[in-house]
Amino acid sequence: MNEMSLPRPNNLDSFWMPYSDNRHFKGTPRMLARAEGMSYYTPEGREVLDGTAGLWCCNAGHGRREIVEAIQKQAAIMDFAPTFQLGHPIAFEAAARVAEMTPAGLDKVFFTNSGSESADTALKIALAYQKARGQAQRVRLIGRERGYHGVGFGGMSVGGIGGNRKQFGAMLPYVDHLPHTHDPARNAFTKGQPEHGVELANHLMDLIALHGDTIAAVMVEPVAGSTGVLVPPKGYLERLREICDANGILLIYDEVITGFGRLGTDFGAERLGVTPDIMTMAKGLTNAAVPMGAVATSNEVYDTVVNNAPAGIELFHGYTYSGHPLASAAAIATLALHREEDLPGRARAIEPYWQEAAHSLRSAPGVVDIRDFGLIAGIELAPREGKPGARAMDVFRKCFDDGVLVRVTGDIVALSPPLIIEKPHVDRIFGTLSDAIHAFA
């Protein structure tokens, strides 16, 4: 594509950018205009290697012809159809393809449009399930400190990142939190799952002692991503599953980041060996080509809600765009790519090289911890006194200027490349990041 033909904004005033320093950006904008394979391109045509799969989401790489053509074909056949009391075949096909991939027993799929909507949907389904089985007193939802479950009021309330909550005042009632699992004193620079911290799951027993039989569900990320890559200690998820089973509590996984090959398996539940009752997903579901999310539930959850309801609507919940035809087409094409190219297998194959490259930064100035699992890595930097986040933001900007896209959360650099990554890409990502870290030592 000719550089002159790339789109260029003529006005930066109208777009209120999400999760952005609007004042800084609009003074010194960094723009992306095109994407292909492993890279973005600026309006000037400069390549920027994508070390973040967009925003944890373009797992198959950018501009995949198979997905583009599926969307184009579907747009010509039918642009939209409602799914309230009506259906269209491609939504059912997309749900079946998702159910083929989810862990055994999670066979019912409810479509949303984002990870945030998936989180709120999962929480509502959990409440509906408890009521349908005669446990209407179970209205309490348990999240985890430093957890991220999107920006709806449900997911934000159950989530545990302070910056996402403090600006908005009141959250949902009847919510409590487990402690996070980050323990740098015992687990710093761990490769893969930490050895220490299984006992942190027992805090759920403390919440049960406090709240009794009012807890409906516990929601956690298999690997916490947006907070800076927190990997669960060995045995931790197994213990959560055990406690939930013994006390009538549903276990919900937020797999918006960990799903669709990111951990070297279709879902994190498979890699970690613990299956939840409800699972949320989005991002990699359509390779981010069209917004779409989903919630997979166990057959028991679905059957309990549906079969115990009076005649008529069983779950008073849904979205105008649930199962949107274009999103469904994108999902079907994306999941076909995952199977045909074995993207989880590709992630597993390169994971050892990725891990060693990440931990090669251990001696870089200001690096206080490195965490990794699958094709995710978090490099934590010592904050500058009185200026939290400033060091990592400088690193982010230098990496971009030097041709590599990374993501920062606080003073943590988070990496999650497309699963089509190859060794030269890995070398370039961590080489550029090393230079940037040294530049701001």
Image (cartoon, rainbow, N blue to C red):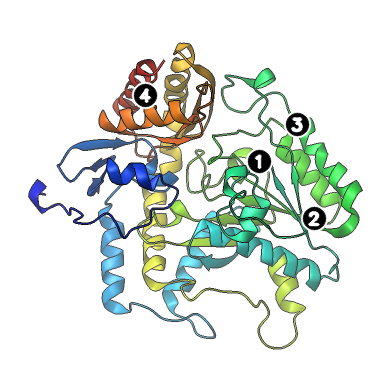
Q: Amino acid at mark 3?
A: Val
Residue, far bottom:
311
**Which is more N-terminal, label 4 or label 1?**
1
Residue that badge 4 annotates: 433
Q: Amino acid at mark 1?
A: Gly
Would residue 195 be visible to someone looking at this image?
A: yes
Pinpoint residue 125: horizontal percent, then vertical percent: 68, 66
Residue visible at 61% across and 62% down?
A: 120
Residue that badge 2 annotates: 249
State the residue in front, 375 or 41.
41
**Which is more N-terminal, label 1 or label 3?**
3
Q: Amino acid at mark 4?
A: Leu
Whole-Å distance between the Cαs marked 1 and 4?
33 Å
Q: Nearer the viewer, mark 4 or mark 3?
A: 4
Pinpoint residue 334: horizontal percent, then vertical percent: 38, 56
Q: Quadrant of the C terminus?
A: top left
Q: Nearer the viewer, mark 3 or mark 1?
A: 3
| In contact (CB < 8 Å): disc 1 and disc 4 | no
Horizontal side, residue 317 vs residue 300: left or right: left
**Which is more N-terminal, label 3 or label 4?**
3
Whole-Å distance between the Cαs marked 4 and 2?
43 Å
Where disc 3 sits, the SS reads helix
Residue visible at 75% across and 31% down?
A: 198
How dense is the environment of label 2, judged by Cα within 10 Å: few (below 14), some, or many (20 and up)?
A: many
**Which is more N-terminal, label 2 or label 4?**
2
Whole-Å distance between the Cαs marked 3 and 1?
15 Å
Q: Amino acid at mark 2?
A: Ile
Residue that badge 3 annotates: 198
